[in-house]
Image (cartoon, rainbow, N blue to C red):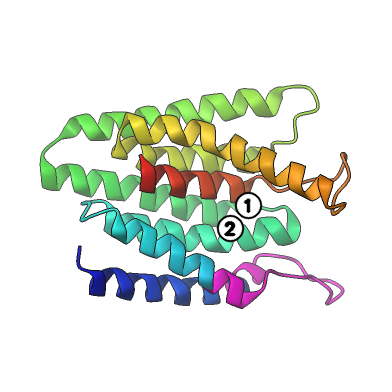
Amino acid sequence: MSALLVTGIALLGAAAGWAAVPAGRSFVPDTDGRVRTPNRSVLALVGAVVFGGLAARGADPALAALLPVAATGLVLVVTDLTALRLPDPLVGLVALGGGLGPAAATAATGEPRHLAVAVAGATLSFIGYALLALLPRARLGFGDVKLAAALGLPLGWLGWPALRLWLLLPHVLAGVTVLVLLAAGRIRRDTPVPFGPALLGGAWLAAVLG
């Protein structure tokens, strides 16, 4: 993919990140007018990196579906950081994009094996995260479980290397983040920490590196 096209897609991601904050706020109840949301400039930068990274991966047939999934993911980051919520309509959009993309790409390439791995990815992700959520004192919610299953579809379509990375990376990212926040005194051991950004960040890294 040409550098000019990658740059254009990165700019599209910046716009998606900028728009994610007001879009996310529409899903977050604000009864006292004091709900704090992430900085729009930071989200715009994150969006540019996310979209640009996916575009730089190459001309993948599923790219057209991965970009809307990434845009919805930016909104989910806002809702989870703001209110520890992963609204079902947004997770549903991730699942829709994650499912339609592999299906369309499979029809275009004539390789049904990829679609089977996509379904396997969603199934493994759902079962694995559901079991983790049922553990005593687990901090995972079923919004996290549903999001994991939705993200497992496109990651599975990209292949087993991407799927294996995806099953590992969110826990690494979440663990490092918690350790840094604890060391900085920003949270306590009993402070709820959103897991959605780690799921989404891990999915992006797995898609780019896998």
**Whole-percent x and y of residue 151?**
45, 43
Report the side of 191 relative to 56 (left or right).
Answer: right
Query: Which residue is depicted at the point 39% across and 63% down?
Result: 51
Report the side of 42 relative to 179 (left or right).
Answer: left
**Amino acid type of the residue that numbered disc 1 sits on in the rendered structure:** Leu
Label 1 residue SS: loop
Label 2 residue SS: helix
Q: N-terminal of the two: label 2 or label 1?
A: 2
**Whole-percent x and y of residue 140?**
69, 36
Q: Which residue is mark 2?
A: 76
**Whole-percent x and y of residue 137?**
80, 27
Q: Is residue 147 above or below residue 138?
A: below
Residue segment shown in magenta: 23-44
Q: Which residue is mark 1?
A: 86
Q: Counting other residues with Cα less than 10 Å from the Cα at mark 2, is it few (<14), some (14-19), or many (20 or more)? A: many
Residue 143 placement: quadrant: top right
Residue 122 placement: quadrant: top left
Front residue of 70 and 28: 70
Front residue of 78 and 42: 42
Query: Which residue is depicted at the point 84% across and 74% down?
Result: 34
Q: Does the magenta segment cover residue 73?
A: no
Q: Counting other residues with Cα less than 10 Å from the Cα at mark 1, is it few (<14), some (14-19), or many (20 or more)? A: many
Report the side of 33 relative to 164 (left or right).
Answer: right
